[in-house]
Amino acid sequence: MAEFILEIGTEEMPARFVPKLAAELEGVFAKSLDEAMVENGGVKCYATPRRITAHVASIALKQHQEEETVTGPPTRIAYDAEGNLTKAGQGFAKTQGVSEDALFKMETGKGEYLAAKKTVGGGNTVDILPDICIKGIESLSFPKKMHWGDYDFTFGRPLRWLLALLDDQVVEFTVENLTTGRETRGHRVMGHGPHVVNSTADYFSVIKNDCKVVIDPEERKKTIIAEGDRLAKELGGEIVWHAGLLEEVANLVEYPKPLIGDIEALYLELPREVLLTSMQSHQKSFGVQGPDGKLMPHFLTTLNIEPLDVALVKKGWERVLKARLEDARFFWEADCKVEFETWLDKLENVVFLGPLGSVGDKSRRIETLCGKLAEVLGESKSIMPGEIEKYAMAGRLAKADLVSEMVIEFDSLQGKMGGIYAELAGKGDIVSQGIYEQYLPAGPDTPVPSSLAGALVSMADKVDTMAGCFGLGKVPTGANDPYALRRCALGISRIIMEHELDVDLDVLLREAQGAYADVKWKVEQPEAFVKLKDFFGQRLRALFIGHGFETRVVDAALGAGFNDIRTLKARLKALSEFSKEADFEQAVLTFKRASNIIRKQGNEAGQTLTGSYDADLFEGEHEQSFGSKLEEIAPRFDDLWESGEFGGLFGLLGELRPSVDGFFDNVMVMCDDADIRLNRLNLLKALVDRLSRLADFNALQV
């Protein structure tokens, strides 16, 4: 076994490209080696802003060799009447690279065919690697590729060198003007090179010691964290780490060197959110906080060099960040002098979405929806009558900060700044929290609003956008979802479930549609409502299947209705547990039979089935037993349903099933007597009405 290394040298690439390129090259290279039948111990790829490296620590010097049988044309075509090979037979032998004597006849399921045994593989790995390397380089994807010079080849950034070694042997291939060799380049300042790599055994030491490059992104992260924590600890604080920024910084540098800088104490008067955003967004730096959680007058940045004059470099970073913080302080002071009413007036001139009016119009709709949601939830969430107008106010002021100086400069602070300004203006916790958390959850893995006010404003904002977009026919198709409507539906669903909000989805959607006035819709509102409701069902289905629930169980739970999203997950969990019981399949068949009879025979009864039946019309012990058992469990069913004890409800089905089976085995539902037939159908209807609240048993295919 040998060792192989491919290094693709480039001009600096954006940090967001780096980890993706390593993952792509690793996948393509591993797949290509397997397809080429080259045994290996696995591929590991590394990337920095200036290089992508594929490393195969153990690779066979020859392809795996195996014999395979290849079929050709049917023998009736391969041989003529005299038994000699035809041109078709001769061509098959030539194509497979075997002598005509080596051909034989083979019986297949389709008849007799000409065949040959062919040895594949066995080639030298060094001869196979060039094509694999070229394929790997060409397969790397970028948002946009670029040309350079007069070359036809395109890549995310210009290629500058190629290194390819199999132990101490150069694997030769060419990409435009570049031919592979054993030279690499190092850090632009600390180890530029070129540096010669005599063999793969020397590569990583040359990269580290001569090139001054930390090639492993995980090692770069660990270095930044360890050194950052050490420096902060010396100041009596800790770094405010941000996972996304840490990933970005680690892929901006080849030689991470954390450095603590200082900021003037006067800037600590700015809100924490503003300080951190200024540091993180503009300077790719982290804040430092004390044991009390308050920010300290320091920041952590990461250099890409070992500076000769640390003080000079530190001063330069401090000067640049100070300019940013000075701008932020100007915006903060300007905003603090403005009344919310001024911003609300400006919203009238900000377009929300074409025919849907201005953002001012949207804020009034959110106000209406928040007030109605608060009124509906009222006692269940301990909302006092006098507080309803506070929830409505949170909705009305939710978008005001969009025209503030701070948010115009730092758009990632929208909502947060509005909440801060509302608190300063004395609007109260309900209003400030509602505004602050309105954009949560921002994705499937981000938290929902922690406050009830934030939950209601977020729901109102999202459902308003959904109702408007569906009314205009702007429905997501495929991967295209420019208005993030999937995220809106998922966010509303998560908020309802995690806050346990007793909200009827139908009512919420109709209220959102009704909040619009004087809009020329492209889709009639009843049709838009149906599409909206179905859209929520699709998102809930994807959510629960993604959480590991069996598809048919999810479909069965949703098929019973999902207006009450609050209890849907509990009902789904209970159904999932019920599906694991030994007699589940037989139980499904029993209850599906009842449902099918009602669906197929109900219309033939001559009148609408109500589920009301007369026990005096029961005939025989089995019909009486079924009716009695149904009467017995009815009040228990209703009590368990009211308390959300879905496990107990499915337990009741286990109690009920023997009498249902006895009924089906011994009673003819569709008898000749019209009154008795109708009574039996209504008895089954009473059963099915309860079952259909738990699950759609027809979706549980067995």
Image (tube, rainbow, N blue to C red):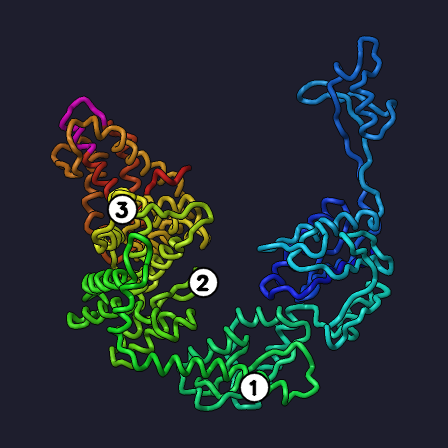
Query: For the point 25% across and 59% down, which residue is it?
Result: 502
Neighbours of disc 2 within 10 Å: few (<14), some (14-19), many (20+): few
Q: Is residue 429 left or right of residue 97?
A: left
Name the secondary structure under disc 2: loop
| Residue identified by numbered label 3 | 521
Between circles 1 and 2, the one closer to the viewer is 1
Neighbours of disc 1 within 10 Å: few (<14), some (14-19), many (20+): many
- Residue 261, label in figure: 1
Look at the magenta stretch and give its main secondary structure: helix
Magenta region, residue range: 670-681
Lower sequence index among marks 3 and 2? 2
Q: Position of residue 423 (x, y in %)?
A: 29, 79
Query: For the point 83% across and 47% down, which residue is it?
Result: 127
In this view, 56 is above or below 385: above
- Residue 461, label in figure: none
The quadrant the N terminus occupies is bottom right
The amino acid marked with disc number 2 is Asp
Q: Are marks 3 and 2 in contact (CB under 8 Å)?
A: no
Name the secondary structure under disc 3: loop
| Residue identified by numbered label 2 | 445
Q: CA distance from mark 3 to mark 2?
A: 34 Å
Q: Nearer the viewer, residue 651 or 142?
A: 142
